[in-house]
């Protein structure tokens, strides 16, 4: 037997064995991987399901808090007007999707129930939610009530102290589960199970695709919230059971996630036949190729390798027209086409770079136009504002004679204060615009920073008193070393920072101002016991026009220029501004300004 025949026989036997083993092992590996993938996905789905319930909780909680602020409801609670209370609870429950709304008295008993009249006067079953709502203004949890699963939100009704509690019960029914399951990126069905009075586990709600073949087993092992158990595969179904977090006095709730493997496996089963055909075709091509590997291959390949190196160096000269019609000829033709395509793309890339440069120049011009517009608008606004402030001051001081009606004087005072406030905002916007364009010029003279801070505290004293916030000074302001700078801009910057600290500090909080030297710098810290800033918001609060948006925005008015203005002014003076904050605890703003030359020399000595 010739060498070529022996080679052909060897290749044929080898490739047939490879085909058979590949088909067997591929299917087994694919199925095993699908099972493992299904387990990982179901564990992720259990976590996603709880996050989706948390999103539902936030939406319902916001709506219930709005109801707790309803004047008519608070009045009805105070007057024990049960009809009005029942009507308000039903109307709001219909809007937020709560099928059961309750009003719980301070004694813990149900005062009004929109669903069960006989529940009035009985104790509210979830006292821990009442305690949480009293302490944190909101109590939410998953719970089983009268055999049904609800997401319960408890919010106090304040006037201003708590006078009652609203309990909104949103049913976790089949429709809601179907909606939550539809948000998943892979197919599975979801069911929620809870034990009945006799201790038998039953499915309380389910999606349309829940398979009755999935058995509720091993639930005794789900002893803690968030624990997960994977069941065996039956009829190509993979099930995962996870115990959900519920209120302390509620029956347990288990989420059952059913992931069908059959549909996914059928796709891979259908791939096996085409794959075998492809392997058979490859066998034929390999046999033909093995018989035709002859002379005349190495030299053309070497020539093509040299041409490829030349192309890599940037020489896109076309290759000579190929004389062969086999694979080598096709490779040569393909290399020519590739060379032509590379040359065209390089030309297009150069054109794109040129276009991008033009676009960048246009963007720079647009930014300059925006800065010029802000500057022009600020200048145009200052003239009428000065007139408004001047005339309102004349009226409130009654320079041309008594007005006669005291209310007009009060109105003039409001106009004057508003005009001054707006003029400060306009000046800050103008300074920021000029600083951005590099045109802002600051005056420098010898200053005592303690005097600047005293002026700011004198201006903000009434604001702090109105907000019931205590201002504390650590140390002696007069002992602070001198600095060189623009008194007006530095004082306005300090005022902005202290005003922010007062604004975001609740009543009976404390704002502390301290100062010391750190090398050649004066370090001033402003610390408050306010609401704090989230870590992801820290880079944003120093950007112009950025505003924090809490639930009730009217409590924190402003246009978002205070901190950006202060940061810009301190940096123009050669200093810096840094913010450290813990949400719910407070914020510390650290300012560093270079000392005056004589002060720095004195400290060095």
Image (tube, helix red, strand yellow):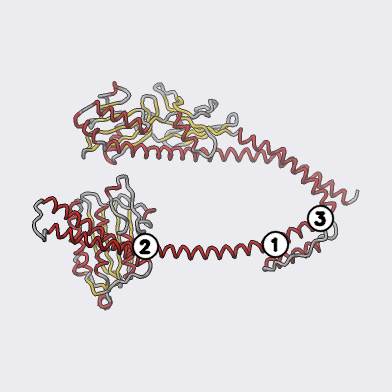
- The residue beneath circle 2 is 373
Q: How many marks?
A: 3
Q: CA distance from mark 1 to mark 3?
A: 21 Å
Instruction: Classify mark 1: residues with Cα within 10 Å, few (<14), some (14-19) or many (20+).
Output: some
Instruction: Classify mark 2: residues with Cα within 10 Å, few (<14), some (14-19) or many (20+).
Output: few
Callout 1: SS: helix
Callout 3: SS: loop
Q: Quadrant location of the C terminus? A: bottom left
- The residue beneath circle 3 is 326
Work out whether residue 358 or residue 482 is closer to the camera in this orientation and state it: 358
Picture coordinates of residue 447, whole percent (x, y): 23, 72
- The residue beneath circle 1 is 340
x 68%, y 36%: residue = 270
Picture coordinates of residue 70, whole percent (x, y): 26, 36
Q: Is residue 365 left or right of residue 513?
A: right
Q: Give the residue at the far right of this rendering.
A: 1
| Residue 199 seen in the current view | yes
Is 101 above or below relative to 161? above
């Amino acid at each position: 037997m010739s060498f070529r025949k022996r080679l052909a026989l060897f290749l044929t036997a080898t490739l047939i064995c490879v085909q058979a083993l590949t088909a067997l092992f591929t299917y087994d590996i694919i199925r095993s991987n699908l099972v493992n993938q299904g387990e990982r996905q179901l564990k992720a789905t259990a976590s996603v399901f709880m996050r989706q319930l948390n999103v539902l909780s936030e939406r319902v909680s916001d709506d219930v808090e709005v109801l707790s602020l309803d004047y008519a409801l608070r009045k009805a609670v105070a007057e024990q007007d049960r009809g009005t209370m029942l009507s308000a609870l039903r109307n709001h429950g219909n809007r937020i999707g709560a099928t059961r709304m309750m009003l719980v008295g301070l004694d813990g008993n149900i005062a009004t129930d929109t669903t069960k009249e006989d529940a009035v006067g009985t104790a509210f079953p979830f006292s821990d939610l009442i305690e949480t709502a009293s302490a944190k203004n909101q109590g939410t949890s998953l719970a089983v009530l009268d055999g049904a699963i609800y997401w319960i939100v408890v919010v106090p009704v304040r006037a201003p102290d708590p006078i009652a509690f609203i309990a909104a019960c949103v049913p976790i029914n089949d429709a809601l589960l179907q909606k939550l399951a539809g948000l998943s990126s892979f197919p599975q069905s979801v069911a929620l199970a809870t034990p009945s009075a006799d201790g038998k586990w039953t499915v309380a709600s389910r999606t349309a695709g829940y398979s009755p073949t999935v058995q509720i087993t091993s639930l005794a092992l789900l002893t803690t919230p968030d624990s997960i158990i994977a069941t065996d595969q039956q009829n190509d179904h993979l099930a995962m059971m996870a115990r959900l977090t519920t209120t302390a006095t509620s029956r347990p709730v288990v989420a059952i996630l059913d992931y069908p493997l059959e549909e996914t496996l059928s796709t891979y089963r259908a791939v096996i036949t085409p794959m075998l055909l492809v392997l058979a075709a490859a066998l034929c091509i390999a046999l033909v190729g093995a018989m035709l590997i002859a002379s005349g291959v190495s030299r053309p390949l070497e020539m093509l390798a040299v041409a490829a190196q030349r192309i890599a160096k940037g020489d896109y000269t076309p290759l000579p027209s190929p004389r062969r019609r086999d694979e080598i000829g096709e490779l040569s033709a393909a290399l020519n086409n590739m060379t032509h395509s590379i040359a065209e793309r390089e030309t297009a890339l150069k054109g794109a770079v040129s276009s991008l440069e033009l676009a960048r120049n246009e963007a720079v011009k647009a930014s300059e136009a925006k800065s010029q517009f802000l500057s022009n608008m600020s200048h145009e606004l200052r003239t009428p504002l000065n007139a408004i402030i001047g005339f309102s001051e004349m009226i409130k001081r009654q320079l041309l004679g008594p007005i006669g009606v005291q209310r007009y004087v009060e109105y003039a005072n409001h106009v004057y204060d508003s005009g001054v406030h707006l003029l400060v905002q306009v000046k800050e916007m103008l300074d920021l615009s000029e600083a951005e364009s590099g045109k802002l010029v600051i005056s420098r003279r010898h200053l005592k920073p303690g005097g600047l801070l005293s002026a700011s505290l004198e201006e903000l004293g009434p604001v702090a008193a109105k907000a019931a916030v205590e201002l504390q000074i650590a140390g002696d302001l007069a002992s602070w070393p001198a600095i060189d700078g623009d008194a007006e801009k530095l004082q306005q910057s300090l005022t902005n920072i202290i005003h922010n600290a007062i604004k975001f500090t609740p009543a009976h909080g404390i704002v502390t101002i301290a100062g010391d030297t750190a090398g050649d710098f004066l370090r001033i810290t402003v610390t408050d016991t306010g609401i704090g800033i989230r870590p992801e918001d820290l880079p944003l609060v120093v950007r112009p026009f950025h505003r924090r948006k809490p639930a009730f925005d009217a409590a924190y008015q402003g246009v978002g220029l205070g901190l950006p203005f202060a940061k810009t002014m301190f940096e123009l003076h050669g200093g810096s501004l840094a913010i450290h904050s813990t949400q719910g605890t407070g914020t510390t703003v650290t300012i560093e300004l270079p000392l005056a030359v004589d002060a720095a020399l004195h400290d060095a000595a």
